[in-house]
Image: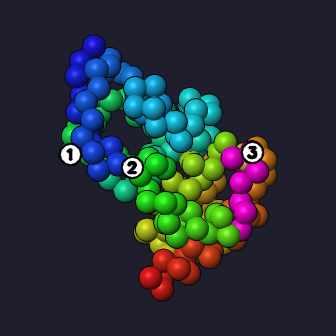
Amino acid sequence: MDKYILNINGKKQTVSVDGDTPLLWVLRDELKLTGTKFGCGKGLCGACTIHINGVETRSCQTSIDFLDDEDQITTIEGLSIDASHPVQKAWVAHDVPQCGYCQSGQIMTASSFLSRNNKPNDDDIDTAMKMNICRCGTYPRIKKAIKSAAKEMKNG
Ligand code: FES
Ligand code: FES
């Protein structure tokens, strides 16, 4: 085991883990940030998506060895205070979640994508979100929520 200093949600945290430990398990097991979910463990479902330096990243595929304390890691818990990010507000307004399991990952992907493109067309949204799977089929509501969050981000 080695010691690692990570910058998570704006706070430096020290963890002792093996270097090949996926960030997902450090977040969930070591730091109890359980908003980030385990789905496939193979980079295929998007349930574990977080941001590293603002870019959506699969935490199940990111070994701790590849990170240093300069990397800004953001989880769903750190996206905003009181769920006030435009994407989170749009998710509530459009009543997006069903079981909810995939939704942290959906929100983290959508928020990163919209930070780069706040005027997305349908194809842009489909491309950005296609690797985030929802077994409950909430895709139509996700798309509506992304469009309304985009409007707020453009005006804000
Ligand atoms: S759990 Fe990471 S992509 Fe599925
Ligand atoms: S809301 Fe159930 S898996 Fe997406």
30 or 56, which lies in front?
30
| Rendered position, 5 above or below 142 | above
- Numbered disc 2: secondary structure: strand
Relative placement, left or right, of 124 versus 140 is left
- Numbered disc 1: secondary structure: loop
Report the residue at 49% width, 50% height from top. Answer: 76
Where is residue 23, by image quadrant?
top left
- Three-letter amino acid code of the residue under disc 3: Cys
Marks 3 and 1 sit apart, C-alpha to C-alpha, by: 35 Å
Report the residue at 62% width, 74% height from top. Answer: 147
Looking at the rendered image, the quarter that the C terminus falls into is bottom left
First in sequence, mark 3 or 1: give its number. 1
Marks 3 and 2 sit apart, C-alpha to C-alpha, by: 23 Å
Q: Residues within 10 Å of mark 1 (few under 14, many from 20)?
A: few
**Residue 70's mark?**
1
Where is residue 41, by image quadrant?
top right
- Three-letter amino acid code of the residue under disc 2: Thr
Mark 3 CB near ligand 2 (8 Å cut): yes
- Numbered disc 3: secondary structure: loop
Q: Which residues are magenta?
A: 94-100
Residue 56 location (% of width, % of height): 45, 51
101 or 22, which lies in front?
101
**Residue tagged 3:** 99
Residue 78 location (% of width, % of height): 41, 52
**Magenta span includes 112:** no
Which residue appears farthest toward the bottom when viewing the image? 155
**Residue 74's mark?**
2
Report the residue at 23% width, 33% height from top. Answer: 5
- Three-letter amino acid code of the residue under disc 1: Glu
Report the residue at 59% width, 53% height from top. Answer: 106
Looking at the rendered image, the quarter that the N terminus falls into is top left
